[in-house]
Image (spheres, rainbow, N blue to C red):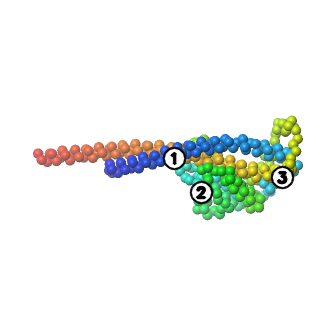
């Protein structure tokens, strides 16, 4: 049975741990608010980008661009799991890796080969441990991704696609729903869907009212420049979603850890009080026994 001193040391240790988890919860909450603000700020830009590409696509007479090329047979697929650089975020990293490996098994069952581009230290270390060959690894920015990070990832996957090393690129990441809920998402980013060049009847009528546009340079050349930016925007949005999900998962995990630490402290305090009472009772019995021996 543990002594009173042992229980006191354990209680002190758990209290110190609870201070750390509370501090990490507050830090994650502050980072989550910033991540939510960045997602909100990106939405108007992404919507305007879609409208601009659709408008230029309508003006282009024929669109045959490498990033839009949908190949008849898909032989190789690049999987890009977006994980964090740190742990202590519940199942955030594990569920992305689990879904990525499930996708790999499904693709290999169809006779396709898989290439990997890792984002985040946790994803890179897991893939390296599983002896997967990496076509790229990007780490050190998952807490606060910048647009330049999305550009680097987009450039690499576009290079793999245009050079024919892969025929499809899939992002696997956590979509932010709330601090308690993160949804694992698979998103095809290459080839870029031709649907972004299409518009409905209402938009066509609005364009007719605004009149015709004169493009300089030609619409096809403008579209060729816009599509890589569109790809970067899609990856940047996924990075922001992943960051918000990570902070939400970490905040929830640290809150649960603090609660569990409190429950453990209460249990240890009860055990300590019982041990102290047992020691006092034993001392009283020894005093009474000694007094009886002297009579």
The CA span between labels 1 and 3 is: 49 Å
Helix, strand or loop under label 2:
helix
Q: Relative to residue 134, is residue 202 drawn left or right?
A: right
- Observer-nearest of 18 and 217: 217
Q: Where is residue 142 in the image (x, y as percent from the top left)?
A: 61, 52
How far is the residue under mark 3 from the one under mark 2? 38 Å
Q: Nearer the viewer, mark 1 or mark 2?
A: 1
Lower sequence index among marks 1 and 3: 1
Residue assigned mark 1: 24
Residue 219 in the image: x percent, y percent?
85, 49
Residue 71 in the image, given as x and y percentages of width and height: 79, 56
Residue 221 shows which numbered tag? Answer: 3
| Residue 121 disc label | 2
Residue 250 appears in the figure: yes
- Residue in the image at 58% along x and 49% along y: 92
Mark 3 neighbour class, 10 Å CA radius: few under 14, some 14 to 19, many 20 or more: some
Q: Can residue 103 be seen in this view?
A: no
């Amino acid at each position: 049975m543990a002594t009173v001193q042992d229980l006191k040391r354990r209680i002190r240790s758990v209290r110190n741990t609870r201070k750390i988890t509370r501090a990490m919860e507050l830090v994650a909450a502050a980072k989550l608010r910033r991540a939510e603000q960045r997602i909100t700020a990106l939405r108007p830009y992404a919507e305007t980008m879609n409208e601009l590409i659709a408008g230029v696509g309508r003006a282009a007479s024929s669109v045959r661009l490498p990033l839009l090329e949908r190949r008849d047979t898909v032989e190789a697929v690049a999987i890009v799991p977006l994980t964090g650089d740190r742990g202590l975020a519940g199942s955030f990293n594990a569920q992305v890796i689990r879904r990525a490996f499930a996708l790999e098994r499904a693709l290999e069952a169809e006779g396709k080969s898989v290439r990997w581009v890792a984002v985040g230290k946790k994803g890179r270390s897991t893939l390296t441990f599983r002896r997967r060959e990496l076509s790229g690894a990007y780490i050190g920015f998952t807490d606060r991704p910048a647009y330049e990070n999305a550009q680097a990832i987009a450039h690499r996957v576009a290079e793999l696609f245009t050079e024919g090393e892969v025929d499809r690129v899939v992002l696997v990441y956590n979509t932010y729903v709330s601090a308690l809920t993160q949804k694992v998402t698979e998103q095809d980013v290459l080839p870029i869907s031709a649907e972004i060049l299409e518009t409905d009847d209402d938009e066509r009528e609005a364009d007719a009212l605004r009149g015709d546009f004169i493009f300089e340079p030609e619409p096809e050349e403008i579209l060729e420049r816009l599509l890589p930016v569109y790809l970067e925007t899609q990856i940047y949005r996924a990075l922001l979603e992943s960051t918000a999900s990570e902070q939400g998962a970490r905040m929830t995990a640290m809150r649960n850890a603090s609660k569990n630490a409190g429950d453990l402290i209460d249990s240890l305090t009860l055990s300590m009080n019982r041990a102290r009472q047992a020691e006092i009772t034993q001392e009283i019995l020894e005093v009474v026994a000694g007094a009886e021996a002297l009579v």
